[in-house]
Image (spheres, helix red, strand yellow):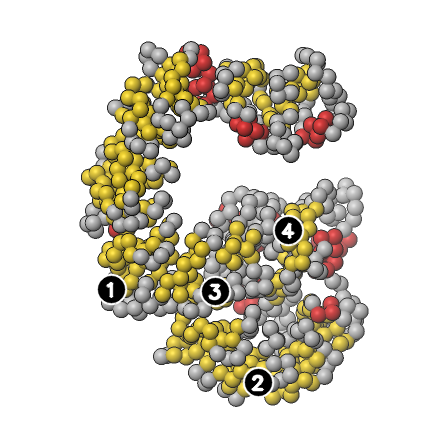
Amino acid sequence: MNKKPNVIYILADDMGYGDISAFNENCPFTTPNFDAMCENGLRFTDAHASSAVCTPSRYSILTGRYNWRSRLKSYVVGGYSEPLLEKGRKTVADLFREQGYHTAMVGKWHLGMNFTKTPEFTELPDFDACKGVDYSASIEDSPVTNGFDYFFGISGSLDMPPYIYIENDRFTELPDRETVGTGKKYWRKGPTGKNFHHENFCTHTYRELPYAKFQKIDCVQFCQYNNLFGVCFFYDQRSTQSYYGYVDDNNHIIIPLVYEKLGKPNETGILSAKLNGRYGVISIDNQIIVPFEYDYLDSFYDGLARFEKEGQKGYINIHGQQVINLPSSCQETHNFQKGQAKVGMRINGKCLYGFIDKAGKFIISPAYDFAELYADKYYRVRKNLAHVFLIDRQGFQILNYGTKQQIALPLDKYYIYGIICGQLIKVARYKKSMSYNEDDQLLWGVIDISKHEVVPLEYSSSQIKLIEGDYILIKEDTGWHYWTSIIGINGSRIPLPESCSSVEYMHKCQIFKLRTKMTCVYGLLSFEHGSLKVIAPLFFEKIIPCLKRHSMFKYNGLWGILSHETGMIIIQPQFHKALKSGDSIYVRSDKQCGFFTPNANTDILSFTPCSEGEWEDIVRCKHSPKHNVTHGLNGMSFLQHLGWEYIYTNNLTGVVSIDTMKIIIPPIYNAIRIINPDKNNRPLIVVVKKYENSYGLMKTNGVLLTPCIHNDINEDDIMRIINGCHKSNKIDMSLNENTTV
């Protein structure tokens, strides 16, 4: 009889080719187990990878595809990242299962998962802990949805939160603390489970159990209840029947290996079991709680377990009482979670889903093709093959407005597409009926968050567009590609120039950029007494908001200045060049150059002439490439806080005061790095680079502290100075203010 071999994939991060003694005769250590595998099996000495880090390698191993065919083009994903595996992508685990294998994975997944998010969800950069994750809910796109029968491990790497073990598609526990590691034991700050400890992660996930008593162990499954292990084995090689039991980590039998199925013990130590083809409930000490008389019985969740018996479906409690009996039309049941469970009912020939409470009453009517619990009190649903929506317990559509407000809309009135912009919501209804039909035509309109109709539901989707600032674009004729009007939140309407192909909201002062068939034009709009009003006509070549009350504008190739509050032209277009610097607008013509500064709370501008040299310094400051400057510890923001900017001369860098035009640091350095380790946000020190690998220290008043003779100066060196430790292992950095080059 041909017997299929067991297959084990072992992925080791940061292992080099020479870290196995069979491959490297000069290896400083021996790897006897790997060497034995090399001696008795195949070894590959000319293998290549298109990426050498963990996430893309895992993607390629699982899918057989080049890693760069995924959306990830560099680096890795984090512990909270969205799934990298495409929907429906077959994995090597799927192939093994198709051949009759049982599959399992232990360790880190690091390919992204879909965690259940609450309305407060906030994604943070650099793989930090994300806010608004429901750790009690199920996980989508985990390994068990990608070909594996069982999974125990973590979502990302050991340095990426969340630090909570995952078993199959759920966290094993809720976080009870936050941890962070520094130095050689580095990991990011993040939520951590009670039983998770970075230092013994491997010993917790990888246990070597000496099952000497059991010669034909098929699989081992860790259980969180009292550190037990569920064991499955075959009685003999000719049988396909598996038998299950529980042992402790000392190899003592807790539940004998006689059951055809075993659930997981709940918090009171009871679990479902299958014996002689029937299901019942036993205790962890193998006492029968519920007789073996059910066709099916699941594990206990939230105090209840779903059952099937003689065509009847429902739920029993831990005492074996059938507390919920569902009607015969019930086609599908799911486990309880947060006091509610999803059930599927056969209605008009199709299975529709809703939610029941522990009394068996429907809190969400069975009316949806798809339904799932979201953030404990909302539900993600799909009806009539349309889009997935968020509803409350009253069946109202929920739309998030910002981070605080919730908007509920009745589904029987609107087909909600879910487009929300500021105070406006784009909605639709079916032209012929409220049921999905390909022949039905959707009629679109716009309502505000108070559910007042701003645009009637009589347009096609392509005729309506919401833009920032609570404005609506309308195309009156479906046959044209051009927008015809802008509509305000109160319904007031302003016609657009002919052949307007795009409209872009540019600033809070309501600047609009319009692109017509031939030109690109700008204008200003405002609201007065609830009506949309043109402040500045839509014909300017450019409008740039640059001061509190003023904007630069360009007309007929020349620059001027206007008030973006009144639309009045303050300075006529007469300058060839204009740019903002600090609280001033610098201008230049053939006859003069200088800068305008505003008077307090007025539209009046004062003009101060300046020399061509000062103008050129400002231009270099604004337009020269920044690659010669490096910024440490948010140096740029501190620089701007002082009212300074970089200046450049002959590819050399300096610093100038914008207000006074006084040069703080002369432009004689190849690079300048602002260092600010002070909690009061005061720049304390400057690193200057005069030549290649030639660094020095400078105070912010331009006084050199050390000559530019050092190979490098880093933030640690600076901190030694701040803390009074003047002697570095690299340089001698005395705080003598009289030090000169």
Camera-nearest label, 4 or 3: 3
Find disc 3 in the rendering and name its residue.
378
> Given the image, on which type of amino acid does mark 3 rest?
Tyr
27 left or right of 46 in image: right
Find disc 1 in the rendering and name its residue.
431
551 left or right of 244 in image: left
- Name the secondary structure under disc 4: strand
Q: Residue at x 70, y 13 (%)?
A: 738
Lower position in the chain sequence, tag 4 or tag 1: 4
Q: Residue at x 52, y 88 (%)?
A: 310
- The image quadrant where one finds the N terminus is bottom right
Q: In this rendering, is residue 675 above or below 299?
A: above
> Given the image, on which type of amino acid does mark 2 rest?
Gln
Find disc 4 in the rendering and name its residue.
190
Report x, y in % for residue 537: 25, 33
Q: In this rendering, is residue 278 above or below 90?
A: below
Lower position in the chain sequence, tag 1 or tag 2: 2
- 570 and 368: which one is in front? 570
- 600 and 735: which one is in front? 600
Lower position in the chain sequence, tag 3 or tag 1: 3
- Name the secondary structure under disc 3: strand
Report x, y in % for residue 173: 65, 63
